[in-house]
Amino acid sequence: MARPSAMELGLAGAATVCALFVASSATAEPAAEPALQWRATPSCSSTQQVREDISQILRQTPGSEREVAARVTLTQERDGIWKVALVTIVAGVSHQRRFDAESCSAAESAVSLILAIASNPNAALTNVDPLANIAQTAANAVPVPAPAASREELDLASERREPKPTSDSARQRSLTIAAGLALDLGTDPSATEGLALGLGYRHKSVRLELFGNAWAERSQTARDTAAGARFRLLSTVLRLGYGWSLGRVELGPLLGIEVASLRAAGFGGSRANFEQSRSLGGLTAGGFAALEVDRQLSVDFEFNAARWLNRPSFVVAEPAPTAPSLLYRPALAVAQAQLAVCLHFF
């Protein structure tokens, strides 16, 4: 059988010491799953996943369980190593441990094992994982006294045991409000900037967003005449995307459906000036890059190509014998970009 690595030995040692701190003489009713705070930078795993791993270990372990509260903080260093700070409270006594892990999944497994053993020391005997075997070897060592619990740690121990309906990153379930600036090339007679306001829903890697855009006014004059029109564009787009996380940055594709209203107000013609609106509908495809500033704030950049399925024509009609002349027609394919600040509510 392969020998455990040095990092595995360190993780096992952390699990062992935590298990040794548990008072073995108390007998209690089966306890609820541990009250747990899980904070990881960058985001990885989740509070719910750790709870499930602990429950799976304890289901296979005979004996009674103790109430355990824990706070776990993970930080990834530049060399890729994860620094783990673990605070546990068992029977009102606080224990603090720090150790390193090669990956987020390794840290999660070690924390799950530590908390399972803290809840029921028999978990060190029933778990056949190599880390648990090492922990079992040291099970008879002398316990080390721990400092008294601080007020913050006592508050942690008194929290409700039910999982909180919160997320550990912007990639979990959230409602989003966004505001930003947008740019359109091709729908109006010239490049047009606009204001973008949006609502969104995100679940893990999937995002669904609805944006409304109000664009600046642009004008166009017909050739060889003073007649022309001022154009005002309003648009709405529904997009669906999927993202892959690279630390604090998320990248992914976008597909969408867009509808727009292009209004033209005429000027300078020999006939009475006109005002009319035409509708456009099209499909969009592109991508996004999102930077997570903190847990509830991100900055999103989106770029899309849109193909209009209909292209209304605006013409200047003068009295005979002057023939009508084409004033403007939107391009078949247009380019769009958007930069928005997003607030996430969990």
Image (tube, rainbow, N blue to C red):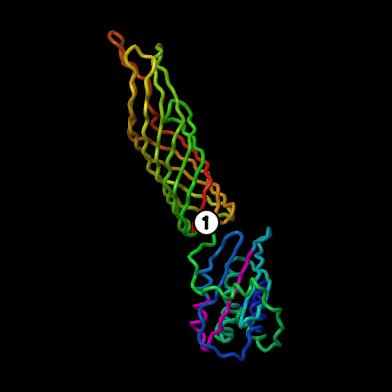
Q: Which residues are magenta?
A: 54-74
Q: Nearer the viewer, residue 27 or 153?
A: 153
- Could you tell me which residue is drawn at 40 percent across and 42 percent down? 237
**Image coordinates for residue 263, horizontal then vertical, percent:** 37, 28
**Image coordinates for residue 218, horizontal then vertical, percent:** 45, 25
Q: Is residue 56 magenta?
A: yes
Q: Is residue 160 magenta?
A: no
Type of amino acid at the residue the image marks with label 1:
Ala
Q: Using residue 193 as the reference point, say whether residue 41 is left or right of it.
A: right
Q: Which residue is situated farthest in the top direction here?
A: 321
Asked if residue 157 is positioned above or below residue 274 in the image, the reply reads below
**Image coordinates for residue 127, horizontal then vertical, percent:** 55, 82
Q: Nearer the viewer, residue 81 or 39?
A: 39
**Image coordinates for residue 201, horizontal then vertical, percent:** 44, 53
* Circle 1 SS class: loop
Asked if residue 91 is positioned above or below residue 209 in the image, the reply reads below
Q: Which residue is situated farthest in the left direction here?
A: 320
Q: Mark 1, residues whose alpha carbon is within 10 Å: few (<14), some, or many (≥20)?
A: many
Number of marks in the image? 1
Which residue is denoted by mark 1 in the rendering? 170
